[in-house]
Every structure is written in structure tokens, then in C-alpha cells.
Image: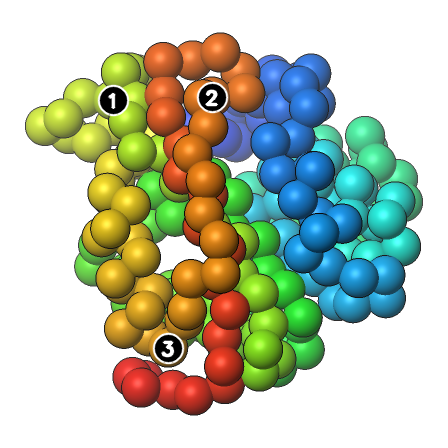
Amino acid sequence: MDELTAAAYQTSAGARADLYESVESPLGRLFPLLFRPEQRVLDVGAGSGRDCAILLSLKIDAHGIEPVGELHREAVIRHPELINRVVHTTLEDYAPAHRGRYDGVLLSAVLMHVPDSQLFNFVLAIRELLKPGGKLVVSVPLERSDVDPTTQRDAAGRLFVLRSEPEVTLFFERLGFAVESRFRSNDSLGRDALWATIVFTWSGDSPAG
């Protein structure tokens, strides 16, 4: 996440957390189909803590990382059960100490904030977190009417790199992931946006990196 994007979330953390908590998670119904109780799942970019709290309610050993300090604060205030489960840190700092520890990783509404120049190392760090056979759930916007196509930013300054579904799929496949399932959905907050959610599995083989 670049500095402008982080700053936008920092200054509007309370309002954004209110928005996220006001609607049903678009991924919540998937969780009991993808993960079993006691499995370890990491939510990268945990935001308000909504998805992490849902996972925990299903007896899944849920953890999260959130790089924006104010959003992390909102998460643990709104979901006290996540204290000591959601931590304020970056993926780069977290991944080296947690290699191979997770049965699943959530990457929901995060990848679009990662510039192309950082994408390869970012996904390698995600891959290192997974156990062989682990699942990676990626949710990305395919279309957004509020993003300037020249700057790739919205009015708040947040970066949105809109990658096509085939582009995202191919990128992860080249890093050893295989598609398990996929679906598309409208925006849960009613914005003019189309989302793709792709569930990948990682065999443990490393064709790159």
C-alpha cells in the first residue's frame, strides 16, 4: 500500500469501519465451505475486523494483520475478541516469522492497492505464509466508476489498480497456485463496481521465487 492510500484510510478509518460493519460480508457464506474448525486462517488487510470475527465465530483459528494503525484500532474496539489476534503490522514484517503456518489466507479488497512494481514480492510473501495445500481467497474489483483511469486513484487518493480476472488468474498460476473456484458479485455497499472472487490452492511447489 502506497503512502497516499494509507493516509486516506488513516484519516477516514472510523467512517470506513462503519461502512464495512453495516453490510453482510460478501465472503462470509464461503468460510464454512472453505475452512474447517481449528484450521489457521490469516486475513491480510483485516480492516474493521468483520471477516476475522466471522471466522472466529465458526471456531476457525483466525488471525489478521492490518497496516493502518487507525483501522487496527477500530477492529479491536468493535471486536474485542480479536485483541491479540489482529496485529498492526505490514505483510513484509509479518511474513518471515510466520512461514508455512496457515491453512488459508484471505486477500479481500487488498490487491488493487498494490502497485505493479510491488506485486511479485507481495504475492511471494503471501505464498510463504501458506501450508502446502493451503487456500488463498482473492477478491478484487474488476470495474469501478469512481476511479480516474489516468491516475488510478479515487477522489480520496486511494490507489486502485484494476486488473482483469484472467490477468489475476494467470499471475497467481505462474507462482504455483491453481484455481479451485471463482465467482463474480456486485458491490456489497451498492457502489458502481463489479468484483471477482477467486479461490486458489497452493500445492507447495515453487515454480518461481
- Is residue 191 visible in the rendered structure shown here? yes
Cα separation, mark 3 vs mark 2, equals 29 Å
Q: Are marks 3 and 2 in contact (CB under 8 Å)?
A: no
Amino acid type assigned to the residue bearing label 1 in the image: Val
The residue carrying mark 3 is 176
Instruction: Please tell me whether residue 176 is drawn above or below residue 38 in the rendered image.
Output: below
Query: Where's residue 39, x and y in %?
Result: 78, 67
- Is residue 121 visible in the rendered structure shown here? no
Between disc 2 and disc 1, whose residue precedes? 1
Judge left or right: residue 105 versus residue 52: left
Does dot 2 land on a helix, a strand or a loop? loop
Q: Quadrant of residue 105?
A: bottom right
Instruction: Identify the residue at image location x=58%, y=53%.
Output: 106
The residue carrying mark 1 is 147
Q: Give the number of marks.
A: 3
Query: Where's residue 21, x and y in %?
Result: 70, 23
Q: Quadrant of residue 151?
A: top left
Q: Single out the mark in the foreground, 1 or 3.
A: 3
Instruction: Please tell me whether residue 76 is drawn above or below residue 170 in the rendered image.
Output: above
Quadrant where the C terminus lies? Answer: bottom left
Amino acid type assigned to the residue bearing label 3 in the image: Gly
Amino acid type assigned to the residue bearing label 2 in the image: Asp
Judge left or right: residue 76 versus residue 185: right
Decide which of 43, 137 is in the foreground and name it.
Answer: 137
The residue carrying mark 2 is 187
Does dot 3 land on a helix, a strand or a loop? loop
Instruction: Identify the residue at image location x=33%, y=75%.
Output: 175
Decide which of 110, 168 is in the foreground and name it.
Answer: 168
